[in-house]
Image (cartoon, rainbow, N blue to C red):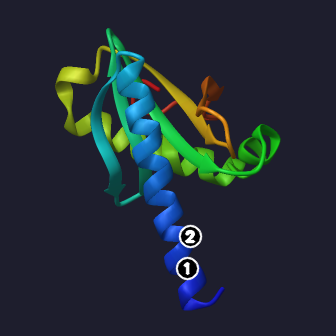
Amino acid sequence: MSRSGRVAAERRGHEGEWLASVWLRLKGYQILARRLRTPFGEIDLIARKRRTIAFLEVKARTDLDAAFSSVSLTAQNRIARAASHWLARNGAHQTHETRFDLIAILPRRLPVHVREAWRPDFAAGGL
């Protein structure tokens, strides 16, 4: 991918994450972190609603199937390790329920929020 292509993709990613965070706030979520970088990887969004912490991956794709298939098992495990790392450093949230969600940003549609889009294939740090 050319430099201009990477810049455009990065811009689309930022726009998608901004739109997803607005959508979540409208649904009553509090955004706790955006683009959180950990030694294990990045989490696009972390949000809380009541006693649930959602670790969200945001994907801008042409359809929902493409969004789902773009989150590989390797990516899911990386996000789960990053989530475990974040929880270990944010003790106030360790007793909350946790889940891994997907927000699909699709052309000419409202964002699609898929709760529990996946579950980690390992148990780590209460996840």
Q: Which of 8 and 30 is in front in this view?
A: 8
- Residue shown at 42% from the left, 55% from the top: 42
Q: In this view, does 63 lie to the left or right of 40?
A: right
Residue 67 in the image, given as x and y percentages of width and height:
72, 45
Residue that sits furthest to the right in the current view: 65
What residue sits 50% from the left and 59% below the top? 13
To which residue does mark 1 refer?
Answer: 6
Report whether residue 101 is seen: yes
Q: What residue type is labelled 1?
A: Arg
> Label 2: which residue?
9
Q: Which residue lies furthest to the front in this view?
A: 108
Label 2 to label 1, Cα distance in Å?
5 Å
- Residue 32: numbered disc: none
Using the image, determine if residue 124 lies above or below residue 4. above
Disc 2 marks a residue whose amino acid type is: Ala
How many C-alpha atoms fall within 10 Å of the one at disc 2: few (<14), some, or many (≥20)? some
Q: Which residue is drawn at 38% across and 21% down?
A: 26
Q: How crowded is mark 1: few (under 14 residues within 10 Å), some or many (20 or more)?
A: few
Q: Quadrant of residue 114 in the image?
A: top right
